[in-house]
Image (cartoon, rainbow, N blue to C red):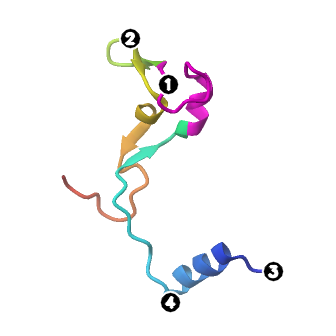
Amino acid sequence: METDLSVELREIAEGTRPFPETTARRHHFVPAFSLACFAEPTGERKGRLFQLDVASGKPQRTSPDDAAFEIDLYTYGPARSG
């Protein structure tokens, strides 16, 4: 049984449907919803948690939405400027 997603992926692979465009630039390598489990208050993506600044060795306060991401990490094709 084919799902809507499998049909869409097959059509992209066959070239009958264009690859979707996105303006997303911040790609999380640890999902923000997972990081929210460690935030205070627990489960809040706007909550607060600490992450280690590897350059200075010091912890810094951040939020799950602002932690563990990289610009253009999952970009397909040449990176965009700007």
Relative to 4, 74 lies left or right = left
The single residue placed furthest to the left in the displayed view is 82
> How far is mark 4 from mark 2, CA to CA?
50 Å
The single residue placed furthest to the bottom in the displayed view is 16
User: Which three-letter amino acid code belongs to the residue tagged 1?
Assistant: Gly
Q: How many neighbours does mark 1 have within 10 angstroms: few (below 14), some (14-19), or many (20 or more)?
A: some
Q: Position of residue 29 (x, y in %)?
A: 50, 41
Q: Nearer the viewer, residue 74 or 17?
A: 17
Query: Mark 3 or mark 2: which is in front?
Result: 3
Q: Position of residue 7 (x, y in %)?
A: 64, 81
Residue at position x 46%, y 33% from top? 68
Query: Mark 1 or mark 4: which is in front?
Result: 1
> How far is mark 1 from mark 3, CA to CA?
41 Å
Q: Is 58 a magenta residue? A: no
**Disc number for residue 16:** 4
Q: How many neighbours does mark 3 have within 10 angstroms: few (below 14), some (14-19), or many (20 or more)?
A: few
Of pointers 1 and 3, the one earlier in the residue sequence:
3
User: Which three-letter amino acid code belongs to the residue tagged 2?
Assistant: Gly
> How far is mark 2 from mark 1, CA to CA?
23 Å
Residue at position x 52%, y 80% from top? 12
Q: Nearer the viewer, residue 3 or 69?
A: 3
Say whether marks 3 and 2 touch (CB < 8 Å): no
Residue at position x 52%, y 37% from top? 32
Query: Mark 3 or mark 4: which is in front?
Result: 3
Relative to 32, 73 lies left or right = left
Which residue is identified by label 2? 57
User: Which three-letter amino acid code belongs to the residue tagged 4?
Assistant: Thr
**Disc number for residue 1:** 3
Please tell me whether mark 2 sits on a helix, a strand or a loop: loop
Which residue is identified by label 1? 47
In the rendered view of the protein, which quadrant contains the N terminus? bottom right
Q: Is 35 a magenta residue? A: yes
